[in-house]
Amino acid sequence: MRRCRTLLIVSLFFLLLGCSKKSSRFPGYSITETGIHYKLISLGDGSAKPEILNYITVNVSYRTVKDSLFFQGLRKFQLTAPRYKGSIEECFLMLVMGDSASFYFPADSFFVKTLETSRPKFINKGDLMRADIKMMDIQTEKQYQLEKEAFLNWINDFGDYERVILKQYMDGEKLSIAPSSSGLYYIPVVKKEGKSVAVGDTVTVNFEGRFFNNKIFDSTKKRNEPFQFVYGQKWQVIEGLEEAIGMMKEGEKSLFIIPSKLAFGEKGSSTGIIPPFTSVIFEVELIEVKKGKG
């Protein structure tokens, strides 16, 4: 009886949000007035509904409209108000605790407006993309800050642990190189006499990030999509990778061992892939340097 009541509430909730004269071109999906196609996959317990500024944990996968998976992972972040019609924030706000649902929405807006980056080459202009989302947890700001404080107290000793792991790796690989003043380890692989990198230059790089067990967590090579950015601009790459690229010349390839303070720090990556206090290895190839105006 309780499940029937919950199902009715959720169904009405989706109906009110998605009420529209439009019909979805995707079988089994409905469509909201803002153009999001949606389908409820499984029902949660209906005990909590996210609000703006709550911290939510979601299991999310992103696919092209042709069903090609290009991201999957557990993410935790603060939910903000939708900044435009048909944004992914609207999708999160349609779910209650434990719900799973599938959504189609414009890919251009997601990459340009939400992620503030360019649309990847494997998605065509004007295409939709699909997100399959499960609402795993919902926390108020206060609950999140209390959990964060407790977690940071618990991992106070992890800094020492990381140093031990780093030393063991260096010993195991028989690496006797000294770190830079910041703690970065630089291992040249291919040396060239190309152009150096300066602030304001546009650089194109291939990189592969991996853990000490050689498990890869990110690779432009696998995506067949070199990364291009303006050197010296904030938030383009992690601090250690920016320092690393600044040590190279055009055409060179190098290995860098980057301690967590220059990588993803005491919190780990926002995607949850990189744990807190984790040193990482990056293999970097500096493909091109276009000189800027300084």
Image (cartoon, rainbow, N blue to C red):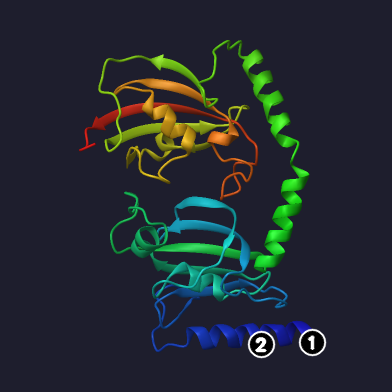
Image spot of residue 28 (x, y percent): 50, 76
Nearer the observer, 132 or 52 = 52
Q: Is residue 42 left or right of residue 204?
A: right
Q: What's the residue at 61%, 10% (across, down)?
A: 174
Q: Answer above or below: position of 225 versus 8.
A: above
Which numbered tag is attached to residue 1? 1
**Any part of residue 27 in sight:** no
Residue 85, image x, y percentages: 39, 75
Residue 258 sits above or below residue 175 on the image: below
Q: CA distance from mark 1 to mark 2?
A: 11 Å
Seen in the picture, residue 288 relative to 217 is either above or below; the reply is above
Query: 148 or 182, which lies in front?
Result: 182
In this rendering, position of residue 264 left or right of residue 149: left
Query: In the image, 54: left or right of 238?
Result: right
Quadrant, the N terminus: bottom right
Around disc 1, counting alpha carbons within 10 Å, would you say few (fewer than 14), some (14 to 19), or many (20 or more)?
A: few
Q: At label 2, which amino acid type do we have?
A: Leu
> Of the residues shown, which amino acid type is indicated by label 1?
Met
Which residue is found at the position 38% from the left and 21% from the top? 253
Count neighbours of disc 2 (C-alpha within 10 A) and say few if under 14, some if 14 to 19, many if 20 or more. Answer: few
Residue ID for mark 2 = 8
Label 1 residue SS: loop
Q: Position of residue 95 (x, y in %)?
A: 60, 74
At x 55%, y 25%, the residue is: 183
Q: Secondary structure at mark 2?
A: helix
Which residue lies at the image location 34% right of the left edge and 50% below the top edge? 120
Residue 8's spot in the image, x, y percent? 66, 87
**If you read the primary sequence from the N terminus, does the residue marked by circle 1 or circle 2 appear first?**
1
